[in-house]
Amino acid sequence: MCYNCGCNMRDNDMGDPRNITDKTFREAAEASEQTLEEAKRNTLELLKLEMEKAIVTK
């Protein structure tokens, strides 16, 4: 999906390449010499930390 809009179409950038798709994760994984799964897992872990911080600072 374009991960940021919630459309559940992970390969559809909705006509705007700035939206986050699986292509984004594949390119990031290649840049870091990781698998797609590793890139997503690392992103998820950071997002969890960031969301926890956001909740605490509210």
Image: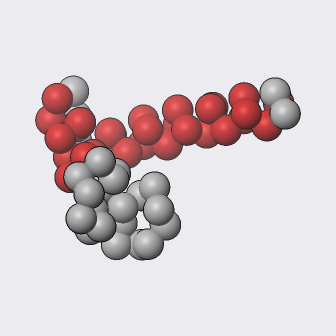
Work out whether residue 6 can be spotted. yes
Q: What is the residue that sits farthest to the bottom in this orientation?
A: 8
- The answer to whether residue 41 is above or below residue 9 is above
Q: Residue at x 29, y 67 (%)?
A: 14
Residue 41 x/y as whole percent: 42, 42
Q: Which residue is drawn at 32% across and 39% down?
A: 39
* Quadrant placement of the C terminus: top right
Q: Which of 57 and 18 is in front in this view?
A: 18
Q: Nearer the viewer, residue 28 or 57?
A: 57
Q: Which corner quadrant of the image does residue 7 belong to?
A: bottom left
Horizontal side, residue 51 vs residue 57: left or right = left
Horizontal side, residue 18 vs residue 8: left or right = left
Residue 17 x/y as whole percent: 23, 52
- The answer to whether residue 51 is above or below residue 20 is above
Q: Residue at x 44, y 38 (%)?
A: 43
Residue 37 x/y as whole percent: 31, 48
